Image (cartoon, rainbow, N blue to C red):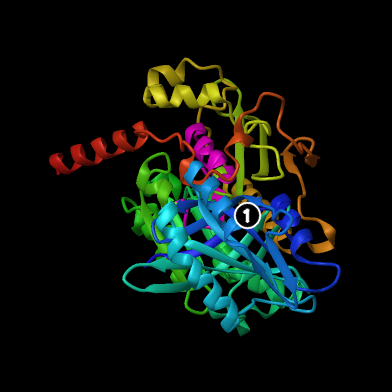
Amino acid sequence: MHEFSVALPENLAEAMRCHLARPDGQEDVCLGLYRPSTGRRRDSAIIYDWEPPEDGERFVDGSVSFTSEYLRRAIARAAREHAGVAILHSHLEDATGWQQLSPKDFDGERRHARVVHAAVKLPLVGMTLAPGDGTWSARRWLVGPSIQVQHAELVRVVGKRLAVSVNPEFAAESQESQVRTVSFWGDLNQQAIASLTVAIVGLGSVGSIVAELLARTGVRRLVLIDYDIVKTHNLDRTITAASGDVGRLKVEVAAERLRAIATAKHFEVEAVNASVVERDGFTSTLDADVIFSCVDRPWARHVLNRASYSHLIPVIDGGILVLFRPGGQQMLSANWAVHTSGPGRACLICQRAYTTDQVSLEQTGLLESEHYIQGLPDDSPLKRRENVIALSASVASFEVLQLVAMVSGLLGLSDPGQQRYSYYPGNVRLEHVTTCEAGCITSSFLAQGNQACAGLGVDHALAALRSQVLTMQSIG
């Protein structure tokens, strides 16, 4: 059985919270609509809208109930939109933390589960709001010969802030080896950060350092996605690799290193030898609550940028550009940028991380042509430039701090903005690109889940690498 989680956009969560957290402190109810998001090992319900009750459709008198007509109305809309149905209710005003189902709530949701499944062919999702502190709890009802309830591991509310409600049964435990970390941002923030599943796409210079930082911080589960192998010229920048690792997969080398240094109890790391622009790699990202984009190609960024909206998984992205004088012997400039995309934020296109023209170019396979690359202008971002570990470490650190800010909201700062560093004159400037430009279609993918077009295809770089490996094996 797949794991289960729930995600919803911040503005929708606030609208439903205002309805459910009644001024008189009583319980209330409403119905919502969700779209599935299917990962390799996790199913998620992406709540994308709600159906407020009309007059006479629900009754509040100590406890709360609703009419069959209200449920039929929500089911009819869900069927039209190929969506699932969620029942959301609140407990009394002083309730805090993850909520358990009362016998009455259990029987009520269970009674509706078979009707909903028969109509929309998706499980009924139940959610409970604790008005005292805004914690959401969730579960789904699996219908077969019998009806089973499966409780979610966590619920994430995604906006500029990533608010995480963690099921105590699955919550990460602080360890003695994390005492300095916990003293900085506190037990609750440590539990939220450590309980996340984090995907790192690209295990090169930046990605390997991000992975090490997260493992030492105490993040309990990491998903590593890359198809490349360690080469000799990677050794001065790939922190997880040593000389004996040349020729091995970067994800396998990194996974071994992380298992040795992780501070989390019951640490898990999954090494995925795949491209994120192909189905296997992309599906693995959907197991995550946050994605780190540590790639140097536009197509992968494009796929992740779209997923950050359609599957409500914030993407933290960073890039480095080093320019040299003709001949390549003297550096002209070194710049890097770090930014986060997702609901409530500008997308990576509008933050100038890449262009759709660059994506189209990569999809043709031309970026695997040395002749074509050599013909590009020297300042083209599509020309790969080697950087140094000092720059990679700086980018990785700023990326991890974007995660900390987004989850903890320390000092009232959930969104530091886009951070741009210039080696000369040696400063970091902040650019607050808060909304997408007019005409940008990225936000139209919001909360679509599996219904969104992911933009996948055949990764020509992966195909070229496999061809090289087969050639070397045949020669050997």
Q: Amino acid at mark 1?
A: Leu
**Residue 353 higher or lower than 356, as above or below:** below
Dividing the picture into quadrants, the one containing residue 91 is bottom right
Left or right, 213 with respect to 435, comes to: left
Point 58% across, 75% down: residue: 167
Tell which residue pokes out farthest to the top in this image: 375
Along the line of sight, which residue is nearer the eye, 399 or 189?
189
Question: In what quadrant of the picture does the C terminus appear?
Answer: top left
Q: Which residue is mark 1?
A: 8
Tally of marks:
1
> Picture coordinates of residue 99 (x, y %)?
64, 77
Q: Is residue 28 visible?
A: no
Magenta segment: does it hold 399? Answer: no
Q: Residue 433 occupies which quadrant of the picture?
A: top right
Q: Residue at x 49, y 27 (%)?
A: 359
> Horizontal placement of 151 versus 395: left or right?
left
Q: What are the residue bounds of the magenta stretch? A: 285-309
Query: At numbered mark 1, what does the secondary structure look like: helix, strand or loop?
Result: strand
* Residue drawn at 78 percent across, 74 percent down: 26
Give the camera-side residue of 274 and 383.
274
Q: Quadrant of the N terminus?
A: bottom left
Label 1 neighbour load within 10 Å: few <14, some 14-19, many 20+: many
Q: Position of residue 141 (x, y in %)?
A: 46, 68
In percent of width and height, residue 236 lies at 49, 50
Is residue 148 visible in the rendered structure shown here?
Answer: yes
Residue 299 in magenta? yes
Q: 39 left or right of 130?
A: left
In the rendered image of this protein, does residue 289 appear above or below residue 89? above
Residue 434, position as x, y percentages in the image: 76, 39
Q: Is residue 319 above or below residue 312?
A: above
7 or 304: nearer the viewer? 7
